[in-house]
Amino acid sequence: RKEVEQDPGPFNVPEGATVAFNCTYSNSASQSFFWYRQDCRKEPKLLMSVYSSGNEDGRFTAQLNRASQYISLLIRDSKLSDSATYLCVVNFGNFNKFYFGSGTKLNVKP
Amino acid sequence: EAQVTQNPRYLITVTGKKLTVTCSQNMNHEYMSWYRQDPGLGLRQIYYSMNVEVTDKGDVPEGYKVSRKEKRNFPLILESPSPNQTSLYFCASSSVTGGPQYFGPGTRLTVT
């Protein structure tokens, strides 16, 4: 079993739609969680950290469910520019050791 | 401008010819990492460093070496590259252990 798993998609949605991604992780001792965005084999860029209480940044909302060991990302009012691959990243508490999901591809269409 | 830089950006080499990919950050970050990205496998951590002279293995360290003699630099060394090391490599740094990372632009390596 992979340490971090994501649905690879692609998710094809029209502009303005709401879309949600989930990511499951295997280690219950995981301590920090992030969503990154990656465009076409460019470097991953931090989208948002995920906090236990959930957090929101504009159209993006991230939530953490420790009991079920998953994190989620909700994108409201999708824009064409949101088309990218979204990476889920988990730190298992081992210093600076991180595990990445394989990514979920989002295509937002006009 | 705060950034992580990598060189070279593209490299084609032959099996067995030693190479070094450089990584430098100007944010005074203590923590740095190297990753490789392969289709369907996502990013996998090769090595990470907690500070100068402190490094540890990630998930896929075989065939790679690193050093951290200065805080800003974290070179990745392939002593004897093989075709299965053909990949896209990213360097990253962070200011807090387990915290958000900032990535370099990537190095696309092809070993023939």
Image (cartoon, grey):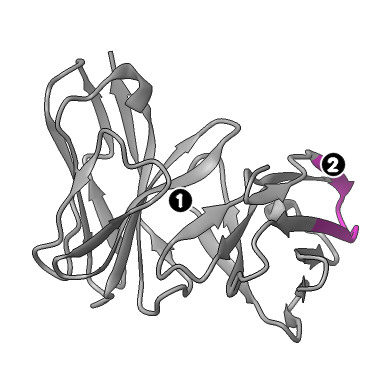
Residue A15 image offset from top left, x and y in percent: 86, 53
Tell me which residue sits at (37%, 22%) in the image.
B84
Residue A43: mark in rendering: 1
Tell me which residue sits at (29%, 58%) in the image.
B56
User: How far separated are the C-alphas under marks 1 and 2?
Assistant: 23 Å
Circle 2: residue type: Asn
Q: CB under 8 Å between callouts 1 and 2?
A: no
Q: Where's the C terminus of chain B, which quadrant?
A: top left
Q: Which chain carries label 2?
A: A
Going from N to C along the chain, the mark reached first, 1 or 2, is: 2
Q: Mark 2 points at which residue?
A: A12
Horizontal relation, residue B3 to residue B37: left or right:
left
Q: Where's the N terminus of chain B, which quadrant?
A: bottom left
Tell me which residue sits at (45%, 50%) in the image.
A43
The magenta segment: A11-21
Task: Report which quarter residue B86 is drawn in.
Answer: top left
Residue B6 image offset from top left, x and y in percent: 25, 50
Element on which disc 2 rests: strand
Residue B88 image offset from top left, x and y in percent: 40, 36
